[in-house]
Image (cartoon, rainbow, N blue to C red):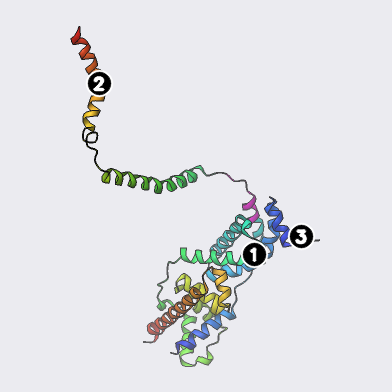
Amino acid sequence: MEPTEAELIASVLKGDAESFEPLVQKYSPRVFATARRYARRESEIEDIVQEVWLKAFQKLKSFRGEAPFEHWLMRLTVRTCYDFLRAHQRNREAAFSELSDPETDWLERFVHHPADAAEHADAARQLIERVLEQLSPAARLVITLLEIEDRPVKEISRLTGWSVPLVKVRAFRARAEMRKILANIAKEKYL
Amino acid sequence: MDLAELNRKLIAAARANPPSQRVPFAFEKRIMARLTRPLVPDYRALWARALWRAAAPCMAIMLLLSAWTFFAPAGSASGSDLSQELENTVLAAVEQDSTADWSR
């Protein structure tokens, strides 16, 4: 019979580091998916995930087992991603004149026939990535969790360690930041 | 341009393209190798960290001593004659020898 998560964790805490491997195997896909929301290069993504697992191993004593291990791990992942965003705030002022041809075409289509600009298009995905990269770390995190992943404010508060009012304030500011960036696109391209 | 609609479309585009859950080959082996590797202490880093941590208390002590010497009330006799006392102490032996010579 396979050992349960609680048994594996207890075993790691007793000094059997090998028992950590099944946990890494089981949860790495989720950690990778989360890291890919905030970093683009594979090398950066791997660095984030590696840091998450090293921290998880070092801080395993602080896991009390009251909530599922996955919740604890995702909290650690989101906070590590936020630290990554704060440490890599460069290139946030990229000009929108550098939009690729498919992105420009998608925008043109949106301006003239909004209904024809498909949300599933690759260009739309590239454009939203570009917009998210322009946001401040806190704004990017809150837009991703709240708008893209559609998580409730309470859960975001738990994941980020911010209070509920702080999440709301940051969400308000993030939406304003996003509107400003979109207005800049419109100004640069169409005025 | 309808910015609210553009915002909605872009958010929908992000939702429609969830990131991949792909894990690089043998990633867990790499992590386990990192975790189980015997720890080699980095003495340079340990010293640097210790010195860096010591900087703040040293600075605080220095400021306290500076403040103390600056604000402490000057002693009536001992404070003003510190240089004289130092000179007397240093030259005490010489003076003793010279008085001994004169008495002969």
Circle 2 chain: B
Check disc 3 and report the residue beneath it.
A3
Asked which quadrant contains residue A60, the reply is bottom right
Task: Work out whether residue A7 or residue B74 is closer to the camera in this orientation and state it.
Answer: B74
Q: Amino acid at mark 1?
A: Ser
Magenta stretch, main secondary structure, is helix
Membership of A15 in magenta stretch: no
Total numbered labels: 3
Camera-nearest label, 1 or 3: 3
Camera-nearest label, 1 or 2: 2
Camera-nearest label, 3 or 2: 2
Q: Secondary structure at mark 2?
A: helix
Q: Quadrant of the N terminus of chain A?
A: bottom right
Check disc 2 and report the residue beneath it.
B92
Asked which quadrant contains residue A70, the reply is bottom right
Position in image of residue A34 (x %, y %): 59, 69
